[in-house]
């Protein structure tokens, strides 16, 4: 007898506290509804707590929140390998750095469904070339996603007004 295959969902954040607080209960909810759920975030005390709280597998991968080209490239390579190995059906990213690395790695790994939630825009608080770079990186992240979800109507209106 063949059993139906559970769809595999990977949720990625830069830091595990985002999974533990902002996304609390979501991974467990999806697991209870038939998904195989894997979480990916940086290592830390919150990683163990969220794994227990959500009752889902946690894979830790160092990711810096700041612009760090060498560390970001290392994280991208490792994340791409992880996703190729896991072969998820869906990757859903949160936070700017996890979005950029996660969407690019998911694309390189051939993940069929890529989702990104925008919770904040660091470029809004930046100036000059840094602002331009961060804004272009956010646009690039969005271009890699099949769907992009602003986490509030205010953020959605801001993005529409700014032409993003």
Image (spheres, grey):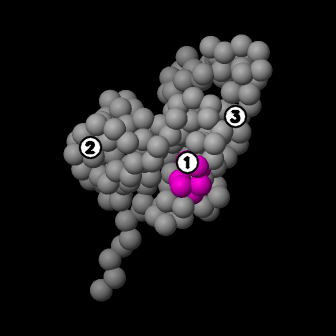
Task: Name the quadrant containing residue 149.
Answer: top right
Q: The N terminus is located in which quarter?
A: bottom left
Mark nearer the viewer, 2 or 3? 2
Of residues 61 and 123, the one drawn nearer to the viewer in this rendering? 61
x 67%, y 32%: residue: 138
Q: Are marks 2 and 1 in contact (CB under 8 Å)?
A: no
Residue 17 appears at what percent x and percent y?
35, 32
Q: The C terminus is located in which quarter?
A: top right
Residue 55 appears at what percent x and percent y?
24, 50
Q: Which mark is residue 137?
A: 3
Q: Secondary structure at mark 2?
A: helix
Of residues 139 and 98, the one drawn nearer to the viewer in this rendering? 98
Disc 1 crowd rating (10 Å Cα; few below 14, some 14-19, many 20+) is: many
x 34%, y 82%: residue: 2
Q: Earlier in the sequence, mark 2 or mark 1?
A: 2
Q: Secondary structure at mark 1?
A: helix
């Amino acid at each position: 007898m063949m059993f139906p295959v559970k769809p595999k969902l990977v949720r990625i954040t830069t830091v595990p506290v985002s999974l533990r607080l902002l996304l609390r209960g979501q991974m467990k909810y999806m697991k209870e509804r038939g998904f195989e759920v894997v979480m990916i975030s940086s290592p830390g005390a919150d990683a163990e707590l969220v794994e227990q709280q959500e009752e889902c597998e946690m894979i830790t991968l160092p990711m810096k929140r700041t612009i760090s080209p060498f560390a970001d490239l290392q994280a991208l390579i490792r994340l791409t390998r992880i996703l190729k190995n896991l072969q998820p059906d869906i990757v859903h990213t949160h936070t700017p750095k996890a979005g950029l690395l996660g969407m690019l790695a998911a694309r390189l790994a051939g993940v069929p469904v890529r989702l990104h939630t925008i919770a904040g825009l660091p470029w809004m608080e930046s100036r000059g070339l840094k602002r331009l770079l961060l804004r272009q990186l956010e646009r690039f992240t969005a271009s890699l996603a099949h769907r992009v979800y602003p986490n509030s109507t205010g953020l959605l209106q801001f993005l529409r007004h700014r032409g993003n």
